[in-house]
Image: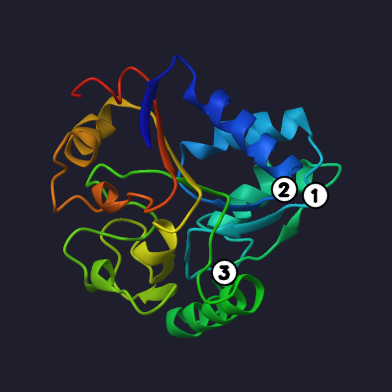
Amino acid sequence: MREITVLEDPGAAVAERLTEVAERGGDIVLTGGSTPRGAYARAAEADGDWSRATVWFSDERMVPPDHPDSNFGMAARTLLSRLSKPPTVVRMQGELDAEAAAGAYEALLRERMGPEPRFDLILLGIGPDSHTASLFPGKPELEERGRFATAVPIAGMEPQVPRVTLTFPVLNNAREVAFLVAGADKADAIARAFTEPPDPEAPAGRVRPDAGSLFVFLDEAAAAKL
């Protein structure tokens, strides 16, 4: 199932969904970027019981967890540290080199979730180039099928630091994937990824859960070219 919803405040809808899945004790994947911050802040204000949930990450920059560019750091400041009943958190180790961090996360995924990780909810964003997580147009990581987490030695945009990302086999095995996108600068990328048929060069358009649901939450500016 695929559903595109245009809202005045799509972050509020995502915050509500995050809280619902967390209170059920789900496995949730958080993402980085600027747009999710508001959703995370709203979820923190709701202060649901996340104690039975486990939080993972879609991708990470190779920086320490307290660095301003750390996806984990942003989520910790805006959401995780503000919950009175926080979840178990499994972060990508940005302080390692990319290959080591990818290998460590792969091992954790296999240990905790088995040979076919199936997340309850994966939250993703989209860049102006239609990248999602750290899966960038034209990069070899797009074709990775054997690993759950892989190193990204050369990013497709700033900050130009190596990264680790989940791969399409994991993203497309989720029970639910939710894109949260806001801003006119994303309108072209949204049209490329979510107009049928999607542009094959748009990584976000390759996110199609095989046996799950895909929800795209947009503000009016991001939806302008659909």
Q: Secondary structure at mark 3?
A: loop
Q: Nearer the viewer, mark 2 or mark 1?
A: 1
- Nearest to N terminus: mark 2 or mark 3: 2
Badge 3: few (under 14), some or many (20 or more) residues near its Cα, within 10 Å? Answer: many
Badge 1: few (under 14), some or many (20 or more) residues near its Cα, within 10 Å? Answer: many
**Amino acid type, residue under disc 3 in the picture:** Met
Question: What residue does disc 3 label?
Answer: 92
* The residue positioned farthest toward the right in the image shown: 84
Q: Is residue 153 left or right of residue 213?
A: left
Residue 78 location, quadrant:
top right
**Amino acid type, residue under disc 1 in the picture:** Pro
CB atoms of marks 2 and 1 within 8 Å? yes
Q: From the top left corner, tell me how far across and down residue 121 is, in percent.
A: 55, 47
Q: Tell me what residue is drawn at x 24 percent, y 29 percent.
A: 187
Q: Tell me what residue is drawn at x 52 percent, y 78 percent.
A: 106
- Nearest to N terminus: mark 2 or mark 1: 2
Q: Is residue 223 above or below residue 109?
A: above
Q: Secondary structure at mark 1?
A: loop
